[in-house]
């Protein structure tokens, strides 16, 4: 390639970064994005009154059409949005990168053929982003990095304040393109090997795939921040929108997402969990099917714990539909509610991408392959806006204002990035070795967390957990110091439940446990020896310092074929809790998980659980999953159902305030006997707004920007002292004022 000096400088920057000693400073559990950026959405379109979601940030998807890109950004900027830009870090089209029809940062046209950079399978298949697309998954070579570098430069030139490089994805069944073979030779200084020839070759290929995306993102973020500083932008930020470790592992995709925590130029992530990922079927207790809520809970957990104590920020994604357009609205809505409730149960995260691609939500017709396809209903669109605006208020919930009604907590399921590396190989590596134990707990009402093994080396990372479940079936520890951390945790009082006795092909690969001075037949043997036990351990219970190891030789993947497979782990959990012997820490199984989060209640009742009884939640609530926001005296959930409720008993009876709305509420002021606020939301949506007030309302004022009166339906809920206003959103500011007299009545 002509731009050799640029590529050399990229490599030098990368070498310098790799050699930096960053140290292990004490950092908070989570770092929030800027205060003014609590919510965002993603679009490729110009401003449209029908998708004016009124989030804090509009993330505009990058397009090579500079004029069109600038117009799109300007249209959102003029409407008051902070601007970010998102681009795919690992894709290239026939019409641009592949054919060389793109310009570098100096404005020079590339004019080189990059078809060798397309990710390919063993039979030569080009891996496409979309089955009929000419948009391909690329090997992240330095040439491709230069292609994306131009996007980073233009993002800053356009005036955006942040860059999102999404989905660094290398498919497990790829690794056969000429570009990858060249990178292999340069990295390993050996001839390329077919990954299918040995476990060693397979793991080396997976590690190279991760390294290439680590290198590319690192170089791009470094360049973006330096260029932004040259332009006088001191707080330019760089994020990685990425699927969860659970999903990439399940789908057979390699990504270095956990490793991005070490990049000083990476400010955080968007955790991309949605119906399309969470509904992926998996076998559990003998049945293979979709389990959207349970899988979403695990996906969000894996992202949260990937980021915890890293110094990075995290947004959760919510998506009202999914990429597959062949489902109907009832399916989309049901699965949206499942994923949303799952995300809200991770109370540590309060920043959201409220939806991607609102055009396809509010203007699309589904199922797309049906003659009876329909656009979104008014009720579902209003529900989405109620939730969107509610998510913008989560960050204002006081820290610590939550409590659980659930089964036993403080349990972790350990997942290593090595499972991602092993998936898709000729040597069986079943995702059920993770999902069977994880679902066994979630289905029993135990909100188990997914713990990335690679994060355990950070000080006190495991201190919040009392029980860990681990198996090296389907994954191997890639560093010996992970075991040192597990040993310290166990001997300090933790209980490790370890599964599996089968020696598999990956145990015999060349690795730390059998190289140099080490001669263990498996990493499990090393762990047992480190705990002071026999390398060839018999199943049973073993005390280790103040903690214990419960060893079960059963295969978690094989347990997934049994209709009673879940009972095995639950009995071990009972045994672990009895050993811990803390009267405040009890063994508890139930068929639901319920979290009180500030004024909210998020609840889910499981099917395939210990009982099929419904859950009745008594109280006084607003049902948020009903666009009319009814006030109800109880909520009944059957197995497989979820709820999101506003708990009116937690609302102060003396403070006038807007509780919920299908519009964004700004400039809320209470002065004397007056409350005023501005309401704004997408056109075409009927807005229900609930306001807590001291007395009944005989009259209110709703006016447009030009002073025109806006009609509204009014209802006063006397028992709850709540005023309900119903009026049309206009995508323009609506000014609302209420007055009450000395007796507490409105005038």
Image (tube, helix red, strand yellow):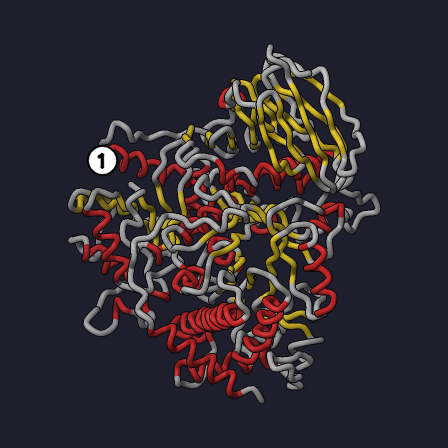
Element type where label 1 sits in the image: helix
The residue drawn where x is 47% and y is 44% is 349
Residue indicated by mark 1: 579
Residue 536 visible at all: yes
Answer with the quarter of the image where residue 631 lies: top right
Q: Please state if 554 lies on the left or on the right of 718 as rendered.
A: left
The residue drawn where x is 60% and y is 78% is 105
Q: Please state if 522 lies on the left or on the right of 534 as rendered.
A: right
Q: Position of residue 499 (x, y in %)?
A: 32, 49
Looking at the rendered image, the quarter that the C terminus falls into is top right
In the depicted view, which residue is nearer to us: 94 or 516?
94
- 304 over 172 or under it: above or below: above
Answer with the quarter of the image where residue 329 lies: top right
Answer with the quarter of the image where residue 446 lies: top left
Residue 616 visible at all: no
- 107 over 455 or under it: above or below: below
The residue drawn where x is 79% and y is 43% is 374
Looking at the rendered image, the quarter that the N terminus falls into is bottom right
């Amino acid at each position: 390639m002509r731009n050799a000096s640029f590529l050399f400088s990229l490599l030098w920057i990368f070498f310098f970064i790799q050699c930096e000693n960053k140290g292990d400073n004490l950092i908070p559990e989570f770092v929030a994005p800027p205060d003014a950026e609590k919510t965002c959405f993603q679009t490729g379109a110009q401003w449209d009154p029908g998708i004016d979601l009124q989030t804090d940030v509009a993330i505009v998807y990058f397009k090579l059409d500079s004029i069109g890109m600038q117009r799109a950004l300007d249209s959102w900027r003029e409407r008051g949005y902070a601007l970010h830009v998102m681009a795919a870090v690992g894709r290239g089209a026939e019409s641009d990168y592949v054919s060389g029809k793109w310009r570098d940062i100096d404005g020079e046209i590339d004019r080189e053929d990059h078809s060798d950079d397309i990710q390919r399978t063993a039979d030569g298949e080009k891996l496409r982003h979309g089955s009929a697309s000419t948009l391909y998954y690329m090997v992240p070579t330095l040439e491709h990095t230069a292609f994306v570098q131009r996007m980073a430069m233009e993002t800053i030139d356009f005036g955006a304040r942040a860059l999102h490089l999404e989905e660094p994805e290398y498919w497990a069944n790829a690794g056969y393109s000429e570009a990858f073979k060249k990178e292999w030779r340069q990295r390993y200084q050996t001839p390329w090997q077919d990954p299918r020839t040995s476990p060693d070759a397979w793991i080396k290929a997976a590690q190279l795939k991760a390294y290439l995306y680590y290198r590319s993102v690192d170089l791009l973020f470094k360049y973006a921040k330096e260029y932004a500083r040259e332009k006088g932008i001191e707080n330019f930020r760089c994020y990685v929108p990425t699927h969860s470790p659970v999903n990439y592992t399940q789908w057979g995709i390699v990504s270095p997402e956990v490793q991005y925590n070490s990049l000083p130029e990476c400010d955080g992530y968007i955790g991309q969990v949605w119906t399309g990922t969470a509904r992926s079927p998996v076998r559990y207790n003998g049945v293979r099917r979709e389990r959207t809520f349970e899988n979403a809970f695990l996906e969000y957990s894996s992202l949260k714990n990937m980021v915890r104590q890293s110094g990075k920020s995290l947004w959760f994604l919510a998506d009202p539909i999914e990429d597959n357009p062949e489902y109907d609205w009832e399916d989309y809505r049901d699965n949206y509610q499942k994923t949303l409730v799952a995300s809200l149960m991770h109370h540590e995260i309060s920043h959201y991408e409220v939806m991607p691609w609102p055009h396809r939500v509010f203007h699309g017709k589904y199922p797309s392959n049906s003659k009876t396809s329909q656009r979104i209903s008014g009720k579902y669109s209003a529900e989405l806006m109620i939730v969107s605006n509610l998510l913008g208020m989560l960050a204002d919930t006081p820290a610590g204002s939550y409590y659980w009604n659930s089964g036993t907590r403080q349990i972790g399921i350990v997942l290593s990035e090595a499972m991602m590396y092993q998936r898709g190989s000729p040597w069986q590596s079943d995702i059920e070795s993770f999902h069977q134990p994880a679902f066994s707990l979630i289905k029993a009402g135990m909100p188990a967390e997914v713990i990335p093994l690679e994060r355990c080396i950070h000080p006190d990372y495991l201190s919040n957990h009392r029980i860990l479940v681990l198996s090296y079936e389907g994954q191997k520890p890639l560093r010996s110091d992970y075991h040192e951390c597990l040993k310290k945790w166990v001997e300090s009082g933790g209980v490790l439940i370890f599964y599996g006795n089968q020696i598999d092909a990956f145990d015999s690969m060349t690795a730390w446990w059998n190289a140099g001075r080490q001669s263990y037949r498996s990493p499990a043997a090393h762990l047992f020896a480190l705990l002071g036990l026999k390398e060839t351990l018999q199943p049973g219970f073993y005390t280790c310092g103040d903690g214990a190891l419960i060893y079960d030789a059963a295969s978690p993947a094989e347990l997934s074929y049994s209709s009673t497979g879940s009972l095995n782990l639950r009995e071990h959990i009972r045994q672990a809790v009895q050993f811990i012997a803390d009267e405040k820490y009890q063994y508890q199984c139930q068929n639901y998980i319920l979290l009180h989060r500030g004024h909210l209640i998020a609840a889910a009742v499981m099917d395939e659980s210990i009982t099929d009884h419904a859950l009745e939640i008594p109280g006084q609530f607003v049902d948020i999953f009903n666009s009319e926001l009814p006030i109800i005296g109880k909520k009944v959930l059957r197995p497989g159902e979820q709820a999101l409720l506003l708990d009116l008993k937690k609302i102060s009876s003396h403070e006038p305030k807007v509780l919920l709305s299908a519009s964004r509420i700004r400039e809320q002021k209470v002065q004397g006997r007056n409350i005023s606020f501005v309401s704004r939301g997408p056109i075409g949506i009927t807005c229900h707004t609930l306001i807590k007030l001291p007395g009944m309302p005989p009259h209110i004022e709703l006016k447009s920007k030009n002073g025109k009166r806006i009609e509204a339906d009014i209802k006063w809920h006397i028992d709850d002292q709540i005023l309900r206003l119903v009026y049309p959103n206009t995508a323009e500011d609506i000014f609302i004022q209420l007055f009450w007299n000395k007796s507490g009545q409105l005038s």
